[in-house]
Amino acid sequence: EPEVTQTPSHQVTQMGQEVILRCVPISNHLYFYWYRQILGQKVEFLVSFYNNEISEKSEIFDDQFSVERPDGSNFTLKIRSTKLEDSAMYFCASMTGQVDQPQHFGDGTRLSIL
Amino acid sequence: GESVGLHLPTLSVQEGDNSIINCAYSNSASDYFIWYKQESGKGPQFIIDIRSNMDKRQGQRVTVLLNKTVKHLSLQIAATQPGDSAVYFCAEINNAGNMLTFGGGTRLMVKP
């Protein structure tokens, strides 16, 4: 069964450094998402992406965050200058785009900021 | 997914019993709901979904009930197995269909 894959599984970065989290969505999916789950909290929406542009973003997704689909398969989340509070699990998800279809999630990248 | 340390409601059931996990949602305009299962170290895994024009939907060993009057969802798991042990989240989709809002989650523990 096709699945969303994320790399790396764990990323350790010094505060202030840039980090790029990578995702390969399911191949025929058209909508892409990033969510995060801070330890001890619930899964939170960050951003949705369709047709090479952001379609919605939350207040968490500030100017330090950006997303990109650099080629036909990858979908990336960049955090420009990481802060301690960016430490979390980051999940990528994708969806076909048909009405009432679920989003399918990857297994996440654990981001640890030191 | 990382749920260690998350202060979650916990449901503990005996293997073979039925489980019922409840969820209250917030947006009365939401018209599509999903239940996800999250095992330790994994991302949310789709279980079952339901549209707001339905009040019940059945899958394999799982049933979702929707009560729009009180904005309540439940997930019923029949003949619960040890492999069902996980954190379960309900999620609602926003009106534009591009953003999931997750509930706080319930940890299901199955005793052999």
Image (cartoon, coloured by chain):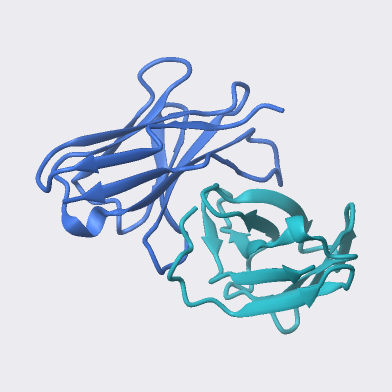
From where the camera sits, is residue B67 visible?
no
Q: Residue at x 63, y 22 (%)?
A: A28
Asked if residue A88 lies left or right of residue B98, the reply is left
**Furthest-top residue in view?**
A71
Q: Residue at x 51, y 52 (%)?
A: B99
Q: Residue at x 50, y 52 (%)?
A: B1
From where the camera sits, is residue B73 visible?
yes
Residue B33: horizontal and vertical position, in percent? 69, 60
**Furthest-left residue in view?**
A16
Considering the image in quadrants, where does the C terminus of chain B appear? bottom right
Residue A109: horizontal and vertical position, in percent? 40, 42
Considering depth in this image, is A12 or B35 the residue closer to the camera?
A12
Q: Quadrant of residue A14?
A: top left
Asked if residue B91 lies left or right of residue B63, the reply is left
**Which of the chains is blue?**
A
> Is B73 rendered above or below residue A102?
below
**Which of the chains is cyan?**
B
> Is B82 rendered above or below residue A54?
below
> Is A91 rendered above or below residue B48?
above
Q: Quadrant of residue B76?
A: bottom right
Considering depth in this image, is A92 or A99 the residue closer to the camera?
A92
Asked if residue B70 lies left or right of residue A54, the reply is right
**Furthest-bottom residue in view?**
B70
Residue B28: horizontal and vertical position, in percent? 63, 74
Residue A39: horizontal and vertical position, in percent? 38, 63
Considering depth in this image, is A41 or B93 the residue closer to the camera?
A41
Q: Residue at x 48, y 77 (%)?
A: B7
